[in-house]
Amino acid sequence: MDSISFLIEGFALAIQPANLIYAAIGVMIGTAVGVLPGIGPALTVALLLPVTFKLDPGGSIIMFAGIYYGGMYGGSTTAILLNTPGESASVVTALEGNKMARSGRGGPALATAAIGSFVAALIATLGLAFLAPILVKVAVKFGPWDYFGLMLIAFVTVSATFGSSPMRGLTSLAFGLWLGLMGIDQLTGQARLTFGVPELLDGVEVTTLAVGLFAIGEAFLVASRHLHKPEKPIPVKGSIWMTKEDWGRSWKPWLRGTVLGFPIGALPAGGAEIPTFLSYNIERRLSRKPQEFGQGAIEGVAGPEAANNASAAGTLVPLLTLGLPTSATAAVMLAGFQQYNIQPGPLLFTQHADLVWGLVASLFIANVMLLVLNLPLVGMWVKLLKIPLPWLYAGILVFASMGTIAANPSVVELLLLTGFGVIGFLMRRYDYPIAPAVVGLILGPLADNALRRSLQMSLGDPMILFQHPSSAIMIAIATIALIAPFIFRGLSRFQHDED
Amino acid sequence: MTPRPIHTPNRPPAVIAIVLFAIAVITYWDASQMTTRAAYGMSASAASYFVALLFAVLAVGHLVSAFKPSNVEVEVADWKAVGWIGLALCGLIGSIWLGGGFILGSTLLFALTAHAFGRRAFLVDLCLGAAIGVFVFLLFNKLLTLALPQGPLEKLF
């Protein structure tokens, strides 16, 4: 198999001492930031992007891998100890995990989440290593029309599966598409929606939008209601190790969660929420002690947490092979690649083969590091939860604005950041999902380009999209997925928040 | 979690509908100003027209939902705290705009945000904010060689 030899080369790159240090730093700061309440992996990566800005691409992408997995791990710690899931994929973990922590079993809850994440990420990363080259072989044959079809699917699934109603998701998506229009058009050199502001000619930075909507918006929201809801972390008492019974009750949910999470994450169908909810329901049905569900059942932490991590690795498949982000975290990761002028997609595997396989190998290494470092260090992470809320959010705002001006030192950028923060606050307040806006900003211009390239190749005949069976099928799927929820309102049972 | 009283009209969707419609009009107007056309295929303004249409459709959708009973409970907000954060961000923007530099700006940002979250030890927060500002500035400018906006304070380093 090609994958194995590539993977060995990747490991050769990843175990160089400098790269190991990058991975370790990534894991540590990823966990530290991910542990902070209200900060999910998407925001963790967005906040830490500027830190990796000036490192060499290889090292910083390895650091990235650590931040990504570390942020996921930190998020589950918060969900268990604070009942403040930083992202919707940890909502389910919080259900049972927080109950376990309240009844003095916080240690085993953290342990099963950590080991389950490790098992899931290990299997799913293997899946990524073997699935990606196969997909790449298919993807190199894709024409622009196929990409257009794929992006339509991504648009529809991201806005229809996130949020409380398809209309709210589509509104958020439209906002992202609108921002994507801003700047100089790549094919004709005309300025779109720049209103004469020179700083807008380059378009809107994805990181500015993500940090504004997520970090600043969250700070506004928490401040607007902090008087009503003070929260304190639950101290971890007793042993953090799992008993024999805990192991026996955990290993099957880990594997089942992985099997659910990876394929759903790999589909361009958006997010880790669906597999975590599915896993939770399956574990409740299969459990020998279903009465414990709702009071702190360890299966309800083990399964969803594994599903969450497996689907996170799964979203890397469309991201790396097709350049398609299907979750907010993947969208921010894509922005991270783009800051080094690396465009994920099938060409990535030929042009930057060492980089991709180095990344995959460091995902394995980051995963092992997380397991080795974090369980013993859990006491340290819990201390981070004790930072007073005012200082915490003040620090987040300083860090967020600093990252924005470090990447692009201008007042206009800060004004945009503040504006996005206010919009993010209003979107949260009125229950609009945020991820579709970020995905829209990234994919909008790509879809525009793909469509126009197709039409140039067909000399303006739009039927080219339907003459190729592949793109015709994808456009049909997207159309059905768009219209179906409006027709069968009862069918949209998966109503979740965004990443 | 206080649900909105029933007698008030369903205002947010109506306001959002107006905003969406305004964006649609602006986008349409902007697209109509783009004169260069593609030789064949789709010109650069087509995407703008499409997004304008999307906004118009969504505006109609929101307008329709404004006349239906609302399913979203809007929580009571502490607008004073929101205002303080706004002021904090303005402090940073103002400081950089007027050449006060990053450290001064982030000190203001830190202390005012902490105030928004209910802390009343303003002097302590100012000092802590300044310490963080200096640390971040040194980390970014010296270690990572990223240029943060410089003012009189930054020149000292």
Image (spheres, coloured by chain):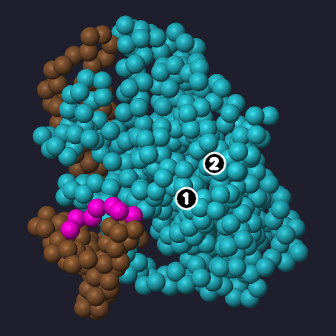
In the rendered image, is residue A343 in sight? Answer: yes
User: Residue A173 location in percent, x, y?
Assistant: 39, 41
Quadrant of res A468: top right
Callout 1, which amino acid? Met
User: Label 2 marks which chain's residue?
Assistant: A
| Above-or-below relation of A104 to A191 | below
Q: Identify which residue, A136 or A391, lies in the foreground.
A: A136
The residue tagged 2 is A358
Q: Is residue A35 left or right of residue B95?
A: right
Residue A378, position as x, y percentages in the image: 64, 79
Chain ID of residue with mark 1: A
Q: Is residue A165 magenta?
A: no
Q: Which chain is cyan?
A: A
Crowding near pointer 1: few (<14 within 10 Å), some, many (20+)? many
Earlier sequence position, callout 1 versus callout 2: 1
Chain B as rendered: colour: brown
Q: Which residues are magenta?
A: B144-150
Is residue A221 shown to the viewer in this render? no
**Three-letter amino acid code at the position of disc 2:** Gly
Which residue does the image show at 47% across and 25% down from the upper left?
A: A148
Per the model, the C-alpha gap separating discs 1 and 2 is 11 Å
Where disc 1 sits, the SS reads: helix
Is residue B146 within the magenta segment? yes
Identified at 48% across, 62% down, the residue is A44
Please name the residue that numbered disc 1 is placed on.
A63
Mark 2, other Cα within 10 Å: few <14 / some 14–19 / many ≥20: many
* Most frequent secondary structure within the magenta stretch: loop
- Depth check: B49 or B15 in front? B49
Q: Is residue A226 left or right of residue A375?
A: left
Name which residue lies at 70% across and 79% down. A376
Quarter placement of the N terminus of chain A: top right
